[in-house]
């Protein structure tokens, strides 16, 4: 069970993600039409106005995450959310399409997805992290569904410039959620290295690269599907566009009943690799169903359901696995590369989805997406089961300096990281049980003043 601090922080950081995603997604279903009212608007520039956000996100995730491994994460999140809010305001005040493009680029400059995830990893125990990441993943999915319903309605009330002002308000509201997140000080063995060396270290790790390919493929397939699927729901399932949210939302809820048990199995019984590969297999199966049964309403919905269930399992497992496999001192950097891969996947998914719409062969379209998923599955077989750390929750000692105390802890074999929350007078000690021996247990008992079960 997550403790009260973890539940509160997970809620706050998931809300930050959801508010940002709402601001991003609400524009998508309306801008292709509403954007034509801007001076100088052309179809290409309207597309650029929508897509430039993802491009600046992909470019700036890594610089933000490199900084987040050296400095406090919360101020960087505030900076990113301020840029997001500022970009919304610039777009809202613009009368030309170029002003909107500049505003969307500024908003995308607040590339703090990886920093938020790294902060969540700091303040959750290893055993509870997948649950926290699952909640964050679900918040993204729910915000996607809500945005596609809310965007057209809000635009009818306040217009397209008003919709951009709403994104600014959401950015400011997201900053206020940080008040619920405790102040965190991270302590680990000091690895002195430059920014380039740190990035190279992350990029040389085979399993991390497989996880980056995984998030790229996952969001490529998701984006392509949401471009390719709507016309088929209209044609073969006789479901009008205005009611598509009523299809996606129940499927999202159903997927929760599969996602959370899968996460518990992955963590409690250390079956993460098996669950991970099974989820990719589920995506392949869902796409295979769509190749052969897209003309039937119920088979079409079955394929979509299989995809959604597997997608949400993957959305929960990926950041948790990443946080386990990344070097302690480069956790945010690894998450930054992963977030860049995610946004690039969405970018290429949009391009591929658009090309699939031109095809006159629907089965071939689904076959192309299936082939991408099969290649992803084959690459993922090279993944090795991640290392599992455990967490001890300890009250901070009153009689010792915190820095001295954490240094003594980190000198003990098997202690990987100490995360201190001074306002709560609590520390999470992250331990590799396979490295702990009798001498280390004695040293830990002596330092903590009590015996701990490891």
Image (spheres, helix red, strand yellow):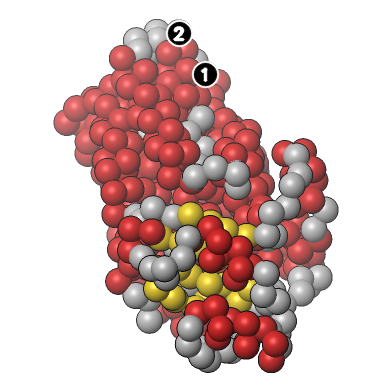
| Circle nearer the N terminus (2, 1) | 2
Position of the N terminus by quadrant: bottom left
Residue 158 visible within the image: yes
Which residue is farthest left? Answer: 157
For the point 38% across and 42% down, the residue is 20
Q: Name the residue under label 1.
A: 45
Asked if residue 151 is positioned above or below residue 339 in the image, the reply reads above
In which quarter of the view is residue 269 placed? bottom right
Mark 2 falls on what kind of element?
A: loop
Q: Which of 272 and 235 is in front in this view?
A: 272
Position of the C terminus by quadrant: bottom right
Mark 1 falls on what kind of element?
A: helix
Report x, y in % for residue 174: 31, 43
For the point 53% across and 58% down, the residue is 403
Residue 244 visible within the image: no
In which quarter of the view is residue 274 placed? bottom right
Report x, y in % for residue 50: 48, 30
Q: Nearer the viewer, residue 296 or 127?
A: 127
For the point 33% across and 63% down, the residue is 424
Which residue is farthest front? Answer: 399
Q: Residue 179 carries which label?
A: none
Q: Mark 2 points at which residue?
A: 40
C-alpha distance separating marks 2 and 1: 8 Å
């Amino acid at each position: 069970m997550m403790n009260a601090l973890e539940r509160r922080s997970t809620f706050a950081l998931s809300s930050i993600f959801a508010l940002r995603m709402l601001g991003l997604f609400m524009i998508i279903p309306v801008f292709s039409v509403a954007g034509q009212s801007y001076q100088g608007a052309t179809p290409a520039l309207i597309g650029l106005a929508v897509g430039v956000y993802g491009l600046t996100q992909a470019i700036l995730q890594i610089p933000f995450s490199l900084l987040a491994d050296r400095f406090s994460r919360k101020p960087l999140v505030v900076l990113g959310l301020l840029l997001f809010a500022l970009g919304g305001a610039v777009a809202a005040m613009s009368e030309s399409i170029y002003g909107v493009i500049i505003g969307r680029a500024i908003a995308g400059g607040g590339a703090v997805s990886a920093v938020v995830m790294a902060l969540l990893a700091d303040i959750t125990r290893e055993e509870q992290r997948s649950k926290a990441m699952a909640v964050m993943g679900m918040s993204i999915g729910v915000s996607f569904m809500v945005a596609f319903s809310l965007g057209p309605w809000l635009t009818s009330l306040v217009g397209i410039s008003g919709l951009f002002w709403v994104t600014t308000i959401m950015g400011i509201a997201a900053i206020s959620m940080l008040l619920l997140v405790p102040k965190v000080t991270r302590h680990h063995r000091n690895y002195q290295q430059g920014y380039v060396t740190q990035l190279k270290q992350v990029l040389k790790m085979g399993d991390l690269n497989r996880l980056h390919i995984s998030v790229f493929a996952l969001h490529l397939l998701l984006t392509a599907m949401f471009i390719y699927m709507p016309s088929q729901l209209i044609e073969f399932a006789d479901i009008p566009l205005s009611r598509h949210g009523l299809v996606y939302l129940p499927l999202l809820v159903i997927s929760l009943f599969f996602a959370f048990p899968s996460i518990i199995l992955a963590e409690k019984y250390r079956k993460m690799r098996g669950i991970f590969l099974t989820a990719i297999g589920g995506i392949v199966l869902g796409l295979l169903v769509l190749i052969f049964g897209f003309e039937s309403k119920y088979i079409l919905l079955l394929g979509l359901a299989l995809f959604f269930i597997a997608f949400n399992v993957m959305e929960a497992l990926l950041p948790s696995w990443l946080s386990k496999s990344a070097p302690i001192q480069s956790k945010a950097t690894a998450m930054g590369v992963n977030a860049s891969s995610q946004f690039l996947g969405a970018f290429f998914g949009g391009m591929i989805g658009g090309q699939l719409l031109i095809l006159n062969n629907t089965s071939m379209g689904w076959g192309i997406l299936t082939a991408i998923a099969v290649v992803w599955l084959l690459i993922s077989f090279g993944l090795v089961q991640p290392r599992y750390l455990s967490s001890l929750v300890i009250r901070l000692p009153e009689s010792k300096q915190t820095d001295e105390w954490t240094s003594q802890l980190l000198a003990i074999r098997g202690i990987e990281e100490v995360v201190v929350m001074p306002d709560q007078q609590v520390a999470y000690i992250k331990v590799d049980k396979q490295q702990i021996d009798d001498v280390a247990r004695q040293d830990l008992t002596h330092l903590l003043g009590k015996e701990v079960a490891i």
